[in-house]
Image (cartoon, rainbow, N blue to C red):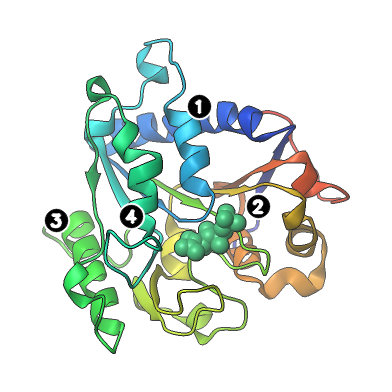
Amino acid sequence: MATSLPNLYSFPNTEALAKQLRPYVLRCQHAALARHNTFRVAVSGGSLPAVLAKALLADHNGSPEDTPQFSKWQIFFADERAVPLDDKDSNYLLLKDELLSKIPAELGAPTVHPIDEKHVHDDDTQALADAYQEDLMRSFAAKESVKLPIFDLILLGCGPDGHTCSLFPGHELLREKDAWVAPETNSPKPPPKRITLTLPVVTSASHIAFVATGGGKKEILKAIFDNEEGRSLPSALVNHGAGDKVSWFTDHPAVEGIAFPRRGSL
Ligand SMILES: O=C(O)[C@H](O)[C@@H](O)[C@H](O)[C@H](O)COP(=O)(O)O
């Protein structure tokens, strides 16, 4: 467990949030490119892709610090539903519609790692998870074997029940220690069959950012940040496991009444 605390940022609205998310992501990009000339990032579904697009596709000033170098990005999915890539429930399709299809040619094209469609209709979702884990192993381990993949950045949402990725409250999967990617066959949020990065992979990332907006998140964020009983919620477990590597990008309605100290800017 980390001894440091997560950073909780709060902004008046999604536009202001996106303006701050941009330099945060680009700082992670520059640090990663300096270290290994590639930027490995994992993204969730839900409302995140739209906010990320707002941040990254905004007008830019052309300086290297303010420019996404998408040709050096490798984009993975923090979780994905067991559906074909053109299904309306696919997180890949969501990201494609919101962001990938709108990247101007001069910013380059990222390498995207979708799930292997040939396993989406298997009765057992394990094969889909295994195939994705093999993709991660090829992408992260190169020649030598690594214990865990270290993402440069993982971008997450937080559900109204405190779930993140497809890690749901009380599910056995929260105790997974060995697998990098695991199946979830009983998701309370439809569709039920999914794959997800596991908690050790999430907390090992260099940077982890949550985006959570709207008054509908107020109760659960209070439980995560202020209440002892919220400690076992999946999003709180990420906070406890990764400490100040975690940054929460919220709007004011989502954190109304929360005692945990907030920061106004990065
Ligand atoms: O595929 C999924 O269902 C998502 O990855 C999921 O984990 C999402 O991030 C949260 O449910 C928050 O969603 P919102 O941002 O839409 O509230």
Q: The residue under label 4 is which amino acid type? A: Tyr
Alpha carbons under labels 4 and 3: distance apart: 25 Å
Assign a secondary structure to mark 2.
loop
Residue 111 placement (x, y as % from top left) = 21, 44
Residue underneath mark 2: 4
Contact (CB < 8 A) between labels 1 and 3? no
Assign a secondary structure to mark 4.
helix
Residue underneath mark 4: 92
Closer to the camera: disc 4 or disc 3?
4
The label shown at residue 182 is: none
Closer to the camera: disc 2 or disc 3?
3
| Sequence-first disc among 1 and 2 | 2
Residue underneath mark 3: 142
Please give the name of the residue rendered at 55% of the width and 84% of the height, measured from the top-left corner.
Answer: 171
Q: In which quadrant of the rendered image does the C terminus lie?
A: top right
Residue underneath mark 1: 23
Q: On the image, which quarter does residue 226 sit in?
A: bottom right
Q: Residues within 10 Å of mark 1 (few under 14, many from 20)?
A: some
| Sequence-first disc among 4 and 3 | 4
Q: Residues within 10 Å of mark 4 (few under 14, many from 20)?
A: many
Please give the name of the residue rendered at 54% of the width and 50% of the height, measured from the top-left corner.
Answer: 47
Question: In the image, 144: left or right of 124?
Answer: left
Contact (CB < 8 A) between labels 4 and 3? no
Please give the name of the residue rendered at 37% of the width and 33% of the height, measured from the top-left corner.
Answer: 29
Q: The residue under label 2 is which amino acid type? A: Ser
Q: On the image, which quarter does residue 160 sit in?
A: bottom right
Q: The residue under label 1 is which amino acid type? A: Pro
